[in-house]
Image (cartoon, rainbow, N blue to C red):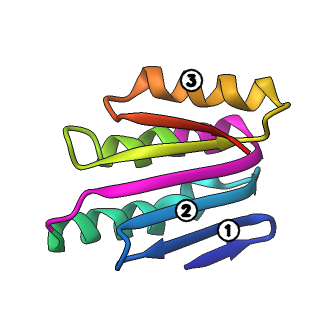
């Protein structure tokens, strides 16, 4: 779908998955993730499937975190789930995923990789 330096976003409509990976620290996260949020909304409007959003990030800034909350809020109320992949030895990234989990009504699955 998009690639912004070190942030990769891939929507697989057949598998009903959206993957956000890499490092998310762009200056204008609102603009960068605007199309992603629109794509998710359109996908859910035209599909009977739930969407799995898979995060596999090594770093993200606070502007990106705000966008992740908005992205996750689109799949609240049974429209999807999140898979949070984090480096096994990186407690901070695990904790950041837990912080997001608290803020939204979306099932989370945590996987150390």
**Of labels 1 and 2, the one closer to you:** 2
Query: Label 3, label 2: how many angstroms apart (C-alpha)?
Result: 18 Å
- Circle 3 crowding by C-alpha within 10 Å: few under 14, some 14–19, many from 20: some
Task: Specify which label sits upstream in the sequence, 1 or 2.
Answer: 1
Residue 3 percent across, percent down from the top left: 69, 75
In this rendered view, identify the residue nearer to me: 86 or 20: 86
Reply yes or no: does residue 105 show up in magenta: no
Residue occupying image coordinates x 21% and y 64%: 49
Residue occupying image coordinates x 59% and y 50%: 55
* Label 1: element kind: strand
Q: Which residues are magenta?
A: 48-67
Residue 79 percent across, percent down from the top left: 23, 49
Q: Is residue 56 left or right of residue 18?
A: right
Tell me the quarter of the picture where residue 65 sits: top right
In this rendered view, identify the residue nearer to me: 100 or 34: 100
* Label 2: element kind: strand
Reply yes or no: does residue 60 show up in magenta: yes
Q: Which residue is mark 2?
A: 19
Q: Which residue is mark 1?
A: 8
């Amino acid at each position: 779908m998009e690639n912004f330096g070190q942030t990769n976003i891939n929507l697989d409509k057949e598998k009903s998955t959206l993957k956000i990976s890499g490092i998310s620290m762009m200056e204008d996260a609102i603009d960068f993730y605007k199309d992603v949020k629109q794509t998710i909304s359109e996908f859910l409007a035209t599909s009977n499937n739930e969407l799995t959003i898979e995060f596999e990030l090594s770093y993200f800034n606070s502007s990106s975190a705000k966008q992740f909350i908005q992205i996750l809020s689109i799949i609240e109320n049974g429209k999807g789930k999140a898979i949070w992949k984090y480096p096994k030895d990186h407690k901070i990234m695990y904790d950041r995923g837990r912080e997001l989990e608290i803020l939204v009504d979306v099932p989370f699955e945590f996987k150390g990789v």
